[in-house]
Amino acid sequence: MSDSMRDKQAGLLLDEPLIFERSRSGQMGFDAPELEEADELLPPELLRDAIEGMPEVSEPEVVRHFLRLSQWNLSAATTFYPLGSCTMKYNPIANEAAARMAGFAGLHPMAPDELAQGALELMAELQDMLAEVSGMDAVSLQPAAGAQGELTGMKMVRAYHSDRGDARRTVLIPASAHGTNPASAALCGYEVQQLEGNALGVVEADAVRKAIGPHVAALMITNPNTLGIFEREIAQVAEVVHQAGGLVYLDGANFNALMGVAKPGHMGADVLQFNLHKTFSTPHGGGGPGAGPVGVRQVLADYLPNPRIVRDGEVWRWSDAAPKSIGRVRSFHGNFGMFVRAYAFIQALGGNGLMRATQMAVLNANYVRARLEEIYHLAVPGLCMHECVLTDKHLEPTGISTLDVAKRLLDYGFYAPTIYFPLVVSGALMIEPTESESLETLDEFIAAMIAISEEAASDPNAIHAAPTLTPVGRLDEARAARKPVLRWKAD
Ligand SMILES: *Cc1c(COP(=O)(O)O)cnc(C)c1O
């Protein structure tokens, strides 16, 4: 094969050039008919014959270019994707078909209520299902993501306290929390006071007792926490907070360890968010779209966002009537397509199916933990819930770090786990297999992790050079973030 052939795309590993490099003067992807009266329709300063700097390519070239690039992307549909805390489970194709039904996909968000009865009913039922599975009293589907659900929840907490003329200023948050927790509290004007977990990564009621007081508006706690460990003292912790007049916010991003098994409403949570794009199997990654419904106990129900779905005789309606509502947190009614997918997922599994999914997710995580803890260092000893956190401690003498392991996994055909999170663990590798994976896939992944550990000792340079089987090698990620080149220039 000649070099010039290789420069074009030979074989299957495509070295795709920038679309600007494909540009050839005079090529066109779309040939619009000449518009005679353009001058009359548009002011002359808005008319132009050419757009400077745009690539000139044919339609098939555009299609192939972007399709090829899309094939470089890893996703839960192409590979094992054990990104801890993100719950990258398989998204059933049947859910996609449901979301694409013309009546749902083509529905305008401002359609009159009478013409959107099916959509409203689906949303009302989904609210009830989420309330049931979490043990909460009421749910709003409006927030667009987990982080926005947190913000919505904390706004309700603030509205609740200010209604009582109570100027509480502080929110308690464990050190292992996701960064969005302190961010959400701070956006609501609160100061964050950090709580330390014990040696097992768990928040003790005693630690909360020491920190609590009339200044504390709420505790934000993740259960299971970001170390994949169940907060054993959650009930006592919630009681301490309630006795001091505070509220308990439960970050529900890790609900994949609870479905059908335990309810945050029974743990003393007053408010929580669901991440439909994690637990309830709607696609995520690449920036969205997500959906972060909030659930509340009765004490906060008055403050839920407006508008709300109400039953008015025989019809469903949107209502803005709740006077204490914090108002809207998002345009229209939330990411409706996600609601259809989550609804389909929950209906397909039913209560027992959800429980079984959780059990499989926890079993899978513990299988990975049990097989790898002999080699990799385990952040917290003992059983985990739906994810396990390993570290690079045993690799220290070889000079190989968590980042190197993550890069090398790409050569083995696996997406890397979450790395360097939670921040309380040095060199963390956080593995969440979810219930979707077969024993064979888990064994292949475990074999790759073991092989990398052996390579670290025998051939560390190979790992430093990884990945070598991907279209591009190791990128300078810091420079890409600080000096992004977003504009192509011919020179
Ligand atoms: C993912 C996650 C969030 C934030 O959810 P987004 O939908 O990404 O905004 C919050 N807390 C935890 C523990 C998470 O894993």
Image (cartoon, rainbow, N blue to C red):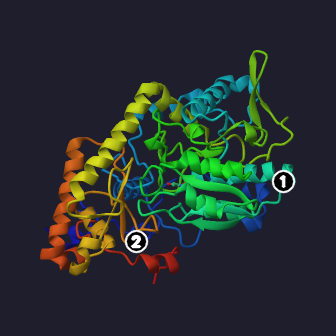
* Secondary structure beneath label 1: helix
Q: Which element carries disc 2, helix, strand or loop?
A: helix
Q: Specify whether 136 is left or right of 4.
A: right
- Location of mark 2 (residue): 21
What residue is pinned by disc 1? 162
Point out residue 96 in the picture as x, y percentages from the top left corner. Answer: 46, 35
Give yes or no for contact between labels 1 and 2 (Cβ–Cβ under 8 Å): no
User: Against 443, is 180 above or below?
Assistant: below
Residue extending farthest to the bottom is: 491
Residue 239 in view of the camera: yes
Q: Judge left or right: residue 318 versus residue 123.
A: right
The quadrant in which residue 257 appears is: top left
Q: What kind of residue is marked 1? A: Ser
Closer to the eye: label 1 or 2: 1
Q: Residues within 10 Å of mark 2 (few under 14, many from 20)?
A: few
The x, y position of residue 195, in whole percent, is: 57, 64
**Residue sitting nearer the eye, 309 or 457:** 457
What amino acid is found at the position of numbered circle 2 in the picture? Glu
